[in-house]
Image (cartoon, helix red, strand yellow):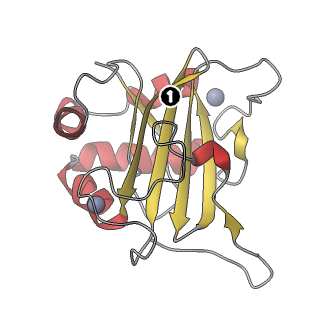
Amino acid sequence: MSHHLGDEDQPQPIPRELYSEYEERPFRTCTRCGEGLADFQGGFQISKAFKNGECVFEYALCDHCRMAMMEEFSQESKQRLGNFQHDHMILDRGLDTCAVCGTSRLDKPMRDYVMTGVCDQNNLLHSLLMCGKCGEDVQELISKPTRDVWRGFVDENFPGPPSDALPEPEETNHPVTPLMAKA
Ligand SMILES: [Zn+2]
Ligand SMILES: [Zn+2]
């Protein structure tokens, strides 16, 4: 994971919006392997999916697990996701504006969206938002085998998760592409 912190950039603490809703505090462990996140070398990723304004799914993935899952994704899917991110996403808009279409979460207000943060220890390095509409577009890029990899992760870690709003992990070294997986 590459951290592009300029000299003048002060790391900011992980905001409340990226806390675990379930635990009502910052994420402490990796959802997949249970490793503690606070001192994990390489950082971690948080994603939270909202439906009708409520958080319906959330996870934190240590960088080791994120990479391990990405390796199982098909080359085709990774290529498409990388291209989409490169061509259509602006990665420094933060948590209030969709990284793809630029819609504000606060104006409407937005009901369905995914928030993602790339973190290191207690600091937020990058964050982004993707609205439900753009998430559906991204979903179209993903192959069936890759969707199955993702479903395996969900099935192992979340008994009875909501089937229609599952943010997937990021594909490259860049800030995270939150994805909406359909059932
Ligand atoms: Zn892990
Ligand atoms: Zn959008």
* Quarter of the figure that contains the C terminus: top left
Asked if residue 50 is positioned above or below residue 94 in the image, the reply reads above
Q: Is residue 3 left or right of residue 164?
A: right
Asked if residue 61 is positioned above or below residue 37 in the image, the reply reads above
Q: Position of residue 119 (x, y in %)?
A: 53, 63
Q: Which of 157 and 45 is in front in this view?
A: 157
Q: For mark 1, what is the residue?
A: 135
User: Mark 1 vs ligand 2: CB under 8 Å?
Assistant: yes
Image quarter for ligand 2 equals: top right
Asked if residue 37 is positioned above or below residue 23 in the image, the reply reads below
Q: In this view, does 103 lie to the left or right of 132?
A: right
Local crowd at mark 1 within 10 Å, few (<14), some, or many (≥20)? many
Instruction: Give the image quarter of residue 99.
Output: top right
Q: Residue at x 50, y 74 (%)?
A: 2
Asked if residue 180 is positioned above or below residue 52 in the image, the reply reads below
Instruction: Give the image quarter of residue 142.
Output: top left
Q: Residue at x 50, y 37 (%)?
A: 48
Q: Is residue 182 left or right of residue 33?
A: right
* Quarter of the figure that contains the N terminus: bottom left
Q: Where is residue 121 in the image (x, y as percent from the top left)?
A: 52, 71
- Total marks in image: 1
Q: In this view, does 45 lie to the left or right of 18?
A: left
Q: Which residue is drawn at 43% across and 51% down?
A: 82
Label 1 SS: helix
Q: Position of residue 113 (x, y in %)?
A: 57, 27
Residue at the farthest bottom position? 7
The kind of residue on which mark 1 rests is: Gly
